[in-house]
Amino acid sequence: MGTSATTEAKALPQFSTITITDQRPEPRGKVEVTPNAGRILFQNNDPVEYRIRFYKPDADPNAGGSIDLLLPAKGFLTLLIRKDDAFSYSVMDPHSENAMTGKGGGPATN
Protein backbone atom coordinates (compact mmCIF):
# COMPACT_ATOMS: atom_id res chain seq x y z
CA MET A 1 0.00 0.00 0.00
CA GLY A 2 1.46 3.40 -1.03
CA THR A 3 1.83 6.44 1.18
CA SER A 4 0.76 9.92 0.22
CA ALA A 5 3.26 12.67 -0.47
CA THR A 6 1.90 14.47 2.57
CA THR A 7 2.85 11.69 4.97
CA GLU A 8 6.25 11.31 3.32
CA ALA A 9 7.03 15.03 3.44
CA LYS A 10 9.12 16.28 6.32
CA ALA A 11 7.02 18.18 8.84
CA LEU A 12 8.34 21.70 9.31
CA PRO A 13 8.65 23.16 12.81
CA GLN A 14 6.39 25.98 13.96
CA PHE A 15 9.45 27.93 15.16
CA SER A 16 13.22 27.90 14.98
CA THR A 17 15.92 29.95 16.72
CA ILE A 18 18.92 31.72 15.20
CA THR A 19 21.41 32.61 17.93
CA ILE A 20 23.72 35.62 17.51
CA THR A 21 27.08 35.42 19.33
CA ASP A 22 30.00 37.75 18.48
CA GLN A 23 27.77 39.12 15.68
CA ARG A 24 27.71 35.67 14.01
CA PRO A 25 24.40 33.88 13.37
CA GLU A 26 24.09 30.16 14.14
CA PRO A 27 22.89 28.34 12.14
CA ARG A 28 24.11 30.38 9.17
CA GLY A 29 22.38 28.46 6.42
CA LYS A 30 18.78 27.86 5.48
CA VAL A 31 16.27 27.90 8.34
CA GLU A 32 12.82 26.63 7.42
CA VAL A 33 9.55 26.81 9.37
CA THR A 34 5.91 26.02 8.63
CA PRO A 35 4.15 28.42 6.23
CA ASN A 36 1.28 28.90 8.71
CA ALA A 37 2.78 31.92 10.51
CA GLY A 38 5.97 30.05 11.34
CA ARG A 39 8.33 32.01 13.55
CA ILE A 40 12.07 32.48 13.41
CA LEU A 41 13.43 33.88 16.66
CA PHE A 42 16.68 35.85 16.55
CA GLN A 43 18.32 35.60 19.99
CA ASN A 44 21.13 38.08 20.70
CA ASN A 45 23.65 36.74 23.23
CA ASP A 46 25.86 39.83 22.89
CA PRO A 47 25.86 42.94 25.14
CA VAL A 48 25.44 45.21 22.07
CA GLU A 49 22.48 45.82 19.77
CA TYR A 50 22.50 44.98 16.06
CA ARG A 51 20.75 46.13 12.93
CA ILE A 52 19.26 43.11 11.14
CA ARG A 53 18.70 43.74 7.43
CA PHE A 54 16.23 41.42 5.70
CA TYR A 55 16.24 41.18 1.91
CA LYS A 56 15.13 38.80 -0.82
CA PRO A 57 17.66 36.08 -1.73
CA ASP A 58 19.77 37.02 -4.76
CA ALA A 59 18.88 40.71 -4.29
CA ASP A 60 21.37 43.48 -3.54
CA PRO A 61 21.01 44.00 0.24
CA ASN A 62 22.05 47.65 -0.14
CA ALA A 63 19.41 48.43 -2.75
CA GLY A 64 15.81 49.40 -2.08
CA GLY A 65 13.36 46.74 -1.02
CA SER A 66 15.18 45.65 2.13
CA ILE A 67 14.04 46.32 5.69
CA ASP A 68 16.14 47.00 8.79
CA LEU A 69 15.02 46.04 12.30
CA LEU A 70 16.75 46.50 15.66
CA LEU A 71 17.86 43.44 17.64
CA PRO A 72 18.36 44.69 21.23
CA ALA A 73 21.41 43.77 23.29
CA LYS A 74 20.70 40.44 25.03
CA GLY A 75 17.27 40.61 23.40
CA PHE A 76 15.04 38.93 20.86
CA LEU A 77 13.45 39.64 17.49
CA THR A 78 10.81 37.42 15.87
CA LEU A 79 10.33 37.08 12.12
CA LEU A 80 6.94 35.72 11.01
CA ILE A 81 7.05 33.67 7.81
CA ARG A 82 4.14 33.44 5.40
CA LYS A 83 3.69 30.88 2.64
CA ASP A 84 6.40 31.23 -0.03
CA ASP A 85 8.37 33.87 1.94
CA ALA A 86 12.17 33.77 1.85
CA PHE A 87 14.59 36.30 3.32
CA SER A 88 18.36 36.46 3.60
CA TYR A 89 19.70 38.68 6.35
CA SER A 90 22.77 40.55 7.55
CA VAL A 91 23.66 41.14 11.22
CA MET A 92 25.14 44.64 11.20
CA ASP A 93 26.42 47.36 13.50
CA PRO A 94 23.39 49.60 14.18
CA HIS A 95 25.22 52.63 12.74
CA SER A 96 26.24 50.91 9.49
CA GLU A 97 24.29 51.40 6.26
CA ASN A 98 26.33 48.82 4.30
CA ALA A 99 25.08 45.24 4.63
CA MET A 100 28.47 43.94 3.50
CA THR A 101 29.90 45.00 6.87
CA GLY A 102 27.63 42.51 8.63
CA LYS A 103 27.61 38.76 9.12
CA GLY A 104 24.91 37.11 7.08
CA GLY A 105 22.86 34.02 6.79
CA GLY A 106 19.73 32.54 5.42
CA PRO A 107 17.53 32.25 3.77
CA ALA A 108 14.79 32.16 6.36
CA THR A 109 11.94 30.45 4.53
CA ASN A 110 9.10 27.94 4.57
Image (cartoon, rainbow, N blue to C red):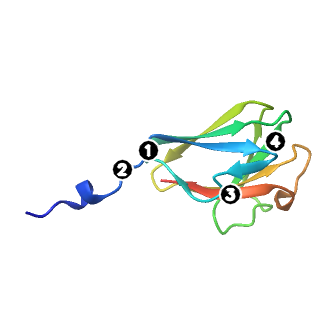
Circle 4: element type: strand
- Nearer the observer, 62 or 5: 5
- Please report the residue visible at 88 percent of the width from the left and 53 percent of the height from the top: 97
Position of residue 2 measured from the top left corner of the image (x, y, whole percent): 12, 64
Q: Which residue is mark 1?
A: 13
Classed neighbour count for the residue bearing mark 3: other residues with Cα under 10 Å, few (<14), some (14–19), many (≥20)? many
Query: Marks 2 and 4, Cα distance to the nearest angstrom?
Result: 32 Å
Q: Which residue is mark 2?
A: 11
Query: Marks 2 and 1, Cα distance to the nearest angstrom?
Result: 7 Å
Circle 1: element type: loop
- Please report the residue visible at 19 percent of the width from the left and 60 percent of the height from the top: 4
Q: Which residue is mark 4?
A: 50
Q: Please report contact status of discs 2 and 1: CB closer than 8 Å, yes or no.
A: yes
Classed neighbour count for the residue bearing mark 4: other residues with Cα under 10 Å, few (<14), some (14–19), many (≥20)? many
Position of residue 83 measured from the top left corner of the image (x, y, whole percent): 45, 51
Say whether disc 2 or disc 4 marks the residue closer to the N-terminus.
Answer: 2
Query: Of the residues shown, which amino acid type is indicated by label 3?
Result: Gly
Question: Relative to 107, does residue 23 appear above or below in the rendering?
Answer: above
Classed neighbour count for the residue bearing mark 1: other residues with Cα under 10 Å, few (<14), some (14–19), many (≥20)? some
Circle 2: element type: loop
Query: Of the residues shown, which amino acid type is indicated by label 4?
Result: Tyr
Query: Marks 4 and 1, Cα distance to the nearest angstrom?
Result: 26 Å
Classed neighbour count for the residue bearing mark 2: other residues with Cα under 10 Å, few (<14), some (14–19), many (≥20)? few
Position of residue 67 measured from the top left corner of the image (x, y, whole percent): 72, 49
Say whether disc 2 or disc 3 marks the residue closer to the N-terminus.
Answer: 2
- Please report the residue visible at 52 percent of the width from the left and 46 percent of the height from the top: 81
Q: Which mark, residue 105?
A: 3
Say whether disc 3 or disc 4 marks the residue closer to the N-terminus.
Answer: 4
Say whether disc 4 or disc 1 marks the residue closer to the N-terminus.
Answer: 1
Query: Of the residues shown, which amino acid type is indicated by label 2?
Result: Ala
